[in-house]
Amino acid sequence: MANHEVNTGRRRFLTATTAVVGAIGAGFAAVPFVTSFKPSARAKTAGAPVTVNISKIDNEPGMRIIQQWRGKPVWVFKRTPEQLGVLASLNGRLRDPNSDNPDQTPDFARNEARTIKGKENIAVIVGICTHLGCSPSFVPEMVPQPFDSEWQGGFYCPCHQSRFDLAGRVFQGVPAPSNLEIPPYHFADGNTIIIGVAPEGAA
């Protein structure tokens, strides 16, 4: 009888101990599982605004800054008065000259230069072709090209020959269905652009 009581007590002790250890183990196993649902630091920063210093593009004509934002390359470059001057003359050759598609152009940039008013010389454009996602080549020279005898500067996508002007507006008769995307952005000061946040008061 005594041995039976000892064995029963031991059994209860071992059962309780096993249950506690199992619960602790399950807790440790659950931590990485639950943590996996949380966004990583990289994912958090991927959608965060980014800061671009544009002072160097004033010193190097034709220079283009490429900044990653939300996994997309964003081009920042300066246009000359001559380049801005030809934009209106291209309207008849473009699919959406007035940037009516809101998915590609926020309200604050729905103008000929597709920029913040008063800063028309600085372009900020997402460098992804709206056809199949290739990255077009930057061809700012205002001279005839093999792909366009009336070229006035812009972007040429070698993947399927889509063309865009220096405001990122798509030409007619090419595979790309819409203009290049303009991201939300604003000027923090004369030399600093914040990509990811629209100008104050903009939709």
Image: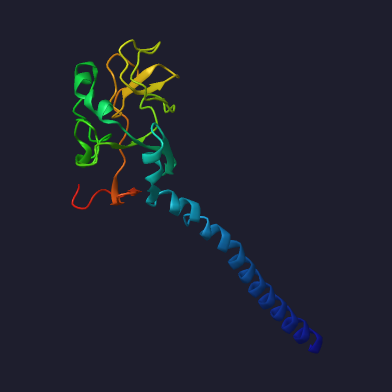
Return the x and y of residue 88 as percentages of the image width and height.
Answer: 19, 23
The quarter of the displayed image where residue 145 is located? top left
Return the x and y of residue 8 as percentages of the image width and height.
Answer: 73, 82
The correct choice, above or below, for 113 with respect to 176 in the image is: below
Q: Is residue 10 left or right of residue 24?
A: right
The correct choice, above or below, for 18 with respect to 86 in the image is: below
Is residue 40 among what the camera can see?
no
**Outermost residue, bottom side:** 2
Is residue 200 among what the camera can see?
yes
Q: Quadrant of the N terminus?
A: bottom right
Return the x and y of residue 182 as percentages of the image width and height.
Answer: 30, 37
**Outermost residue, front side:** 59
Q: Residue at x 27, y 16 (%)?
A: 172
Q: Residue at x 69, y 80 (%)?
A: 12
Query: In terms of depth relative to the viewer, which is nearer, 116 or 173?
Result: 116
Query: In terms of depth relative to the viewer, which is nearer, 94 or 36?
Result: 94
The quarter of the displayed image where residue 124 is located? top left
Query: In terms of depth relative to the viewer, which is nearer, 2 or 32?
Result: 32
Return the x and y of residue 44 as percentages of the image width and height.
Answer: 44, 54
Q: Residue at x 40, y 10 (%)?
A: 146
How was the colour assigned to the protein in this rendering?
Answer: rainbow
